[in-house]
């Protein structure tokens, strides 16, 4: 599909057919996440793929009922330790020539301000990166003829405990995916006039 068609035809899908998703599709979707950009290329996203029927059923204990009806749900996590690899990732980027011939200078006063992040800001920034990877998966799923829905309403603590996630893995959102059993019209959106503050 053309990217424009993917963007225009994507909907949040909350009704799924029981048909299974081919494994190649799941891999394609996860690979779309892998290719997402991230600050300093730290790639903090980590995924748990839930597809066996008992595990799917168990999701009913933690989240909205429609999620368990999807043949696959991806638990999208942020690795809260990912910033530790910042230097390593930066070296890789340099080696790959990402900054060759690029002006990276900025006023010293600004560098000092941007460098200071507290724990909550770091977590927010990691989740921001994970969100980009999630939207890559949403768009690739649409491209493959599948429906999906971002789900942020779930009990993170209980889900993490059931999945026995290491403490550094924060379950950021769920992404149920499957063939759609509904054809929703476009959902309401603000007009461009409402979202463009100014053009200068
Ligand atoms: C960050 C984020 C969190 C969301 N959380 C939920 C959710 O917990 N449950 C749900 O049913 N939909 C959730 N949605 C889907 C939105 O309700 C949906 O994107 C919005 O209503 C617009 O509809 P559309 O996606 O079909 O265009 C979420 C979407 C985003 C981007």
Image (cartoon, helix red, strand yellow):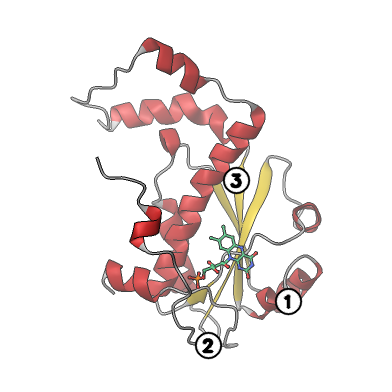
**Disc 3 crowd, CA 10 A, few/some/many (<14, 14-19, 20+):** many
Q: Where in the image, quadrant-wise, is ligand 1 located?
A: bottom right
Q: CB of mark 3 within 8 Å of CB of mark 2?
A: no
- Cβ of mark 1 under 8 Å from ligand 1: the answer is no
Residue 78: numbered disc: 3
- Relative image position of residue 71 (x, y in whole percent): 60, 78
Identify the residue at image location x=74%, y=54%: 156
Inter-mark Cα distance, 2 to 1: 16 Å
Quadrant showing the N terminus? bottom left
- Relative image position of residue 66 (x, y in whole percent): 68, 78
Identify the residue at image location x=44%, y=71%: 141
**Disc 2 crowd, CA 10 A, few/some/many (<14, 14-19, 20+):** few
- Relative image position of residue 160 (x, y in whole percent): 75, 53
Q: Which of 89/197 is in front?
A: 197
Dot 2: element: loop
Inter-mark Cα distance, 1 to 3: 24 Å
The first of marks 3 and 2 along the sequence is 3
The first of marks 2 and 1 along the sequence is 1
């Amino acid at each position: 599909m053309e990217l424009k068609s993917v963007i225009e035809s994507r909907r949040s899908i909350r009704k799924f057919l029981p048909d299974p998703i081919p494994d190649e599709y799941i891999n394609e979707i996860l690979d779309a996440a892998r290719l997402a950009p991230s600050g300093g290329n730290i790639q903090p996203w980590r995924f748990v793929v839930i597809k066996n029927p008992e595990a799917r059923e168990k999701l009913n204990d933690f989240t909205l009922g429609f999620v368990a009806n999807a043949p696959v749900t991806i638990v999208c996590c942020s690795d809260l330790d990912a910033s530790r690899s910042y230097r390593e990732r930066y070296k890789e980027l340099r080696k790959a020539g990402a900054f060759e011939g690029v002006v990276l200078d900025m006023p010293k006063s600004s560098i000092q301000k941007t460098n200071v992040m507290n724990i909550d800001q770091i977590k927010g920034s990691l989740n921001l990166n994970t969100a980009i990877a999630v939207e890559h998966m949403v768009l690739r799923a649409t491209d493959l003829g599948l429906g999906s829905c971002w789900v942020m309403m779930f009990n993170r603590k209980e889900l993490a405990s059931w999945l026995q996630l290491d403490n550094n893995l924060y379950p950021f959102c769920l992404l149920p995916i499957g063939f759609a059993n509904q054809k929703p019209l476009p959902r309401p959106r603000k007009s461009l006039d409402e979202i463009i503050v100014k053009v200068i």
